[in-house]
Image: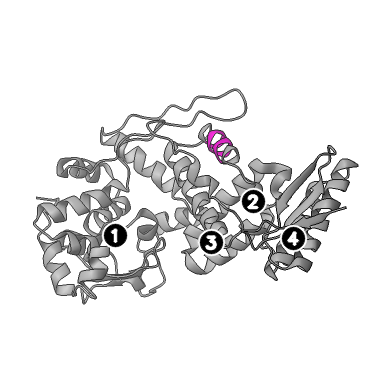
Amino acid sequence: MASLRRLPNSPFWIACFTLPDGTRTQRSTKSADRRDAQRIANKFEDASKEARQGRFIESQARKVIADIFAIGNRDQLPSSTVKVFFESWLKRKELEAGEKTHIRYGVVVEQFLEHLGSRTGSDIAHITSKDITGFRDALAKRSSANTVNVSLKILRAALNQAQRDGLVDQNQAGRGSVLTGVGQSTRRSFTLDEVRGVLAVADDEWRGMILTGLYTGLRLGDIASLTWANLDLQTRELHLVTQKTNRSQNLPLAKPLLRWFEALPVCDDPQQPLFPRASERYAKNYFNGDLSKQFYQILVSAGLAKARVFKETGKGGRVRHQQHELSFHCLRHTATSLLKNAGVSDVIARDIIGHESPAVSRQYTHIDDATKRRALDDMPDVFK
């Protein structure tokens, strides 16, 4: 039989009850109301009896805790299973993230749930740091370190939301370390001579995409998705909303890039892609896989990378390749470097490239097109 006592210097009642092994114990009810405290004490006692008889399963334990929480707080205990929480989080992110980013989130969530197996029906609070590191290590066997670290970042963001919602006390994904130095190289910018070498071996469509990446800093997916509606030759600008950040950008065209666009055959359909083959490939692969592989082959042809040799693992898969120091994304870094080398301020360079920056938000509400055009005109002409 559960009973109550109270210490002279505390407003809270203490529950006295018998543990499953027969010993008496005391637990604070954290309630100053005697009636509520007795109800909580009885819950402790009932749970102990169930455990003593071997019938106290996980779902009953959660129910007892929820009942005690409801008695003490006059509210329901926030809870959610792993599967339900992540599905809800993905639904929320659908409104906040770009389409491709949301799909990427979905892939990581699907992989994590598959890793947990039958435990996806457990409460989200039961996720441990071992679950996170186990997922990390399993993913590292088939993916690059960069892919693994991005996946951990996505899990960390999801569990941050769970913590804000009161579903977990700690973000267990924040306790897992990222991979460093495994399967990855330090990314760097291209030199102008390297860009010229790449342009020399690329076909005409890829040449246009490379010039666009170099003189706008746009990501490969954004470039592959450009249509004639995004191009305004009269104002000499590209207008688009970026997929990753949903940022609206008006980008003046640097002279070398403008010349390439002006040489294209005129198209009357504004919905037609500027880069048809790349657009078709990108539509089939949201994460640029095919296009990135094509660009890597261009690097090989330019003598800037070695041909990849895939080795069979003997288990139906292939050993993942080492990440190279150069990729299409490096053109984004190159654009930033060229702007800064031309004396363009960091704030203006970030605005052109599309980097989110506290300085941009704090110092500028709008950087006019003329300022951006002057900055782009100061960039070197790769054909000279």
- Of residues 236 and 346, the one nearer the viewer is 346
Between disc 2 and disc 1, the foreground one is 2
Which residue is disc 3 drawn over?
164
**Residue 138, picture quadrant:** top right
Label 1 residue SS: loop
Callout 3–callout 4 Cβ contact below 8 Å: no
Q: Is residue 113 above or below residue 375?
A: above
For the residues labelled 2 and 1, the Cα–Cα distance comes to: 35 Å
The residue segment tinted magenta is 132-139
SS under mark 3: helix
Label 2: which residue?
Answer: 125
Secondary structure that dominates the magenta span: helix
Residue bearing mark 1: 355
Quadrant of the image occupied by residue 10: bottom right
Mark 1 and mark 4: Cα distance apart in space:
49 Å
Q: Secondary structure at mark 4?
A: helix
The earlier-in-sequence mark between 3 and 1 is 3
Residue 267 visible from this viewpoint: no
Q: CA distance from mark 2 to mark 3?
A: 13 Å
What residue is rendered at 47% in x and 64% in y?
97
Marks 1 and 3: in contact by CB < 8 Å?
no
Could you say where residue 59 lies in the image, as x and y percent from the top left? 79, 52
What is the number of the mark on residue 39?
none
